[in-house]
Amino acid sequence: MKKRYIFLGLIFMLVLSACQTTVEENTDIPEQTNNGNIEDLEISENFNWRLTKDVKLQITSDHDLVAEVNSSDGSVVYHKAHINSEETYDANISVPSSVEELIINGERVQLNSNEIAVHISDVNNLKFLKASTVYSLYFDGSNDFVFINDGDLNGEIPAATSWSNTDFTISAWIYLQSTSDRKPIASKQGNSVSGNARGFMFSATNGGLELEVFTSDGGAPSDKTSVTSSSGQMSTNTWYHVAATYEYVSDGTSKINLFIDGVNVASSNTAVGPIQTNPQPLHVGRYYWSSGYSRYFHGYMDDFRIYSVARSESEIAGDRSTTVPSNSPNLELNWLFEEGSGTTAGDETSNNNDGTISGAVYSSTTVPYIFTDTDGDGVTDDDDDYPNDPTKAFNNYFPAAGFGSLAYEDLWPGKGDYDFNDVVIDYQFNTITNASNVVVEIIASFKAKASGATLENGFGFNLPDASTAFTGSPEKLNVTGYDLQEGFITLNAYGHEDNQTKPTIIVFDNIFNLLEKTGGGIGVNTEPAQAFVDYEDIIITMVPNGTFTMADFSLTTWNPFIIVDKTRGHEVHLPDYAPTDLADHSLFGQWEDDSNPSVDRYYKTETNLPWALDIPIAFEWPIEKNEITLVYLHFAEWAESGGVLYTDWYSNTAPSYRDDAKIYMVPLP
């Protein structure tokens, strides 16, 4: 039998409380049958009372990009970050227990585990970070080119002797320094080696584009098709994205299309085909027929690609302004010219079609991809939550869908009336990171909404899983915005509570300094007959001093608590959440409390009931003297099932979910 020790201070507290509970009498519990009474529930001792679940997403990609984690309907953004293609990025998120699926850059992910590996691969679902490349390749127009011999070509390269396909797309970014005559972009024809000579040549010709294809080495018109766009469409010293597509049709209606900056500028549906294969090298920047007849590209070139399909206009326009993943569908060769030195043009694909650079040199004149990056932080404006601020890039909200709520009973270690309205606070954190995923600041928004008690309660939180770098180093986190007027909280010079191992922030020390009592009834905003008091907002700003990531704060495992009646050691936490360093441990095990710190059991009764709830949406709390089980009609089923059933009991999903007549509603004006 648990011993009960009655202290004068506790007696005084209970006398003041509107939710008075004594051994002999509980005047705050409304008259009701035991049907649905919270004290009659059979709760597992292992039930943690959580309405959310933590998920660790281990995200990889073939490319540097911005990853965005969304709800299944796309309405909620749970996480945004820059993903480095060379590393695994861990995104630790908290979602409502009812959530079973997420969308990550367009890919649906089932939440069938608390750790999930996600690989972003679909080119159409990438949100790219890069606003430009680092290098391009410069061709002097005299004798510079890149080549790969026919025998070294892998995959489906048009006109190669190993080519078993019939269709292709060739694309590149070009910056012409001369528009006169023909400036070859890519060709696979000539007389470099013996054998078939003709295949194709793609050129910038007189400021336009030209693609010529051959079915044989013969000179008859039936052996060749040449499609040329209007001259003068491209000028010198300007970057253009160019592309040519060929689609073979056996009835003589093969198709050629030419594109400048994603727009079709010339086409034919009477091209010859299929294209002849030949043993000539694949040349970029060069057409070589003989020592006396050759042509060279003059200018800069970047992001050269060959696909084994005739891509559509929308596909070409859709990813021309980004580099693409190495495993993009039908991508056979991709030279980004990003090596910066040497004579090898590395192929980004697994085909290993590395080219040899002859004469051409690397340049820092690079493609200004059309995604706007106003602040120059490397995150395009479309993905940047702060497009005009280079020090900030992403907002990461917790809870992500909007404000969550905390609802407390304040008579611990004695039991209360279970209307969970003694302190009601809404909360939401916004962790602002830069383009390198470094935390710039954390904005914690709180809204004091109700206090169904007479006790002058405070509120705070600590970060139990924060980095050990903060331990003993309070200067690494500056905190502002708190409302402390009562004089019993001691802060260090950096705004968090002194003598705490982990960062501990006291948001306010007396709720009635925020919600002024109207003089009637019990507390504030729990009785419809009493005047409504406007909610009070408090904004806490936390600015780290140093390089920290979101994982260093671990906000999803934060530990919120109330301080009862201005008694600093009298803390009330969520069930099984440990007290702070300043809590009075002598209160554990008194009255109805069944805490056992030796096994990390805290703030539960012998029947495993809690003194606080954390709800992932803005909670509509019971009117005074209405037990939660009689207000939210599936609460009992959720609790007795260990959180398996009715994980959304707090919502208004259907008429059977709650009794609106017993919920406090803000009066209409």
Image (cartoon, grey):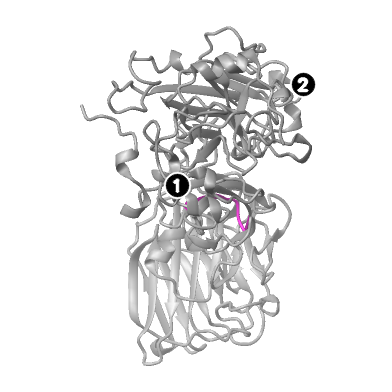
Residue at (63% x, 55% y) in the render: 114
Which labelled disc corresponds to residue 382?
none
Q: Is residue 349 visible?
A: yes
Q: Quadrant of the N terminus?
A: top right
> Of marks 1 and 2, which one's residue comes earlier in the chain?
1
Relative height, residue 62 to residue 1 (above, below): below
Label 1 environment density (alpha carbons within 10 Å; few <14, some 14–19, many ≥20): some
Label 2 environment density (alpha carbons within 10 Å; few <14, some 14–19, many ≥20): few
Relative height, residue 108 to residue 198 (above, below): above
Quick one: which residue is furthest to the front in this view? 24
Expressed as whole percent of the image width and height from the top left, the position of residue 549 reads: 65, 36
Read off the residue under disc 2. 472
Quick one: which residue is furthest to the bottom in this view? 251
Read off the residue under disc 1. 371
Relative height, residue 119 to residue 410 (above, below): below
**Front-most of 42 and 519?**
42
Question: Magenta residues: mostly which secondary structure?
Answer: strand
Q: What is the secondary structure assignment of the residue under circle 1?
A: loop
Expressed as whole percent of the image width and height from the top left, the position of residue 349 reads: 64, 67
Expressed as whole percent of the image width and height from the top left, the position of residue 285 reads: 57, 63
**Front-most of 579 and 659?**
659
Q: Which residues are magenta?
A: 59-70
How many numbered discs?
Answer: 2
State the CA–CA distance, disc 1 to disc 2. Answer: 44 Å
Q: Are marks 1 and 2 in contact (CB under 8 Å)?
A: no
Q: With 342 as the anchor, is 55 left or right in this view? A: left
Q: Quadrant of the C terminus?
A: top left
Residue at (54% x, 47% y) in the render: 52
Relative height, residue 490 to residue 305 (above, below): above
Q: What is the secondary structure assignment of the residue under circle 2?
A: loop
Q: Amino acid at mark 2?
A: Gly
Q: Is residue 61 magenta?
A: yes
